[in-house]
Amino acid sequence: MFRRRIDREFREAQRAGQALLQMHASWPAPDIASPAAEPAPEAGVVPDFPPPDLRVPSRQEVEGLMMRWEQPLIIDGEVRECPQCGAYRDWIVFSMRDDTIQLRCHAGHTTTEPRLDPAWYNRNSGPVDQWHPTLDDGLRHLGH
């Protein structure tokens, strides 16, 4: 007795679901411009993170981001050394607005590192914890 009622309710639910699917299939497709197909990233290449639309909005007083890198910096399997003094640890890494990465050793020598990019910086840096009006203030905050 109860089984028949459960079977009837199940069939009614199936019919209602089928009617909903048929109604949905008869609707015209929305007119949405399809986004341009993005090329698939090459094997071994990590996509830029975070995406450009989620990055910190550029402000006039911000020229770039900086972080401290205390351990030896290994790039392409070799330890990066300062070309002037030979220091190989305790770097300040700058991610500049022009998408270059600059390294500053503890002695104050600055050099551009073409093998690093903003995507590397974004993967390895922590959250921005403070804004600094001058480079000296930022270096003082990071202990240089």
Image (cartoon, rainbow, N blue to C red):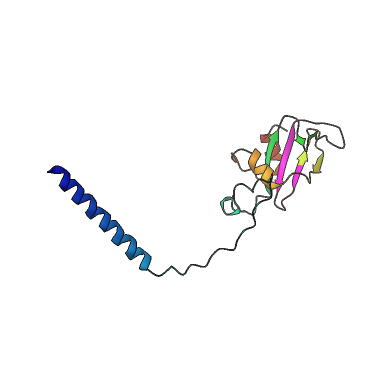
Residue at horizontal 80 percent and vertical 37 percent from the top: 108
Residue 110 horizontal side relative to residue 12, left or right: right
For image coordinates 81% across by 42% down, the residue present is 111
Magenta-drawn segment: 87-102
Reply above or below: 58 against 75: below
| Residue 124 image offset from top left, x and y in percent | 65, 38
Magenta stretch contains residue 39: no
Is residue 97 part of the magenta span, yes or no?
yes
Quadrant including the N terminus:
top left
Q: Going by the image, does 80 lie left or right of 21?
A: right
Which percent across, then down, holds residue 101?
74, 45
Query: x%, y% of residue 83?
Result: 86, 37
- The front one of 108 and 120 is 120
Give residue 125's quadrant in the image: top right
| Residue closer to the observer: 20 or 32 | 20
Q: Position of residue 109 (x, y in %)?
A: 82, 38
**Image quarter hosting the C terminus:** top right
Q: Residue furthest left?
A: 1
Residue at (68, 43) in percent of width and height: 120
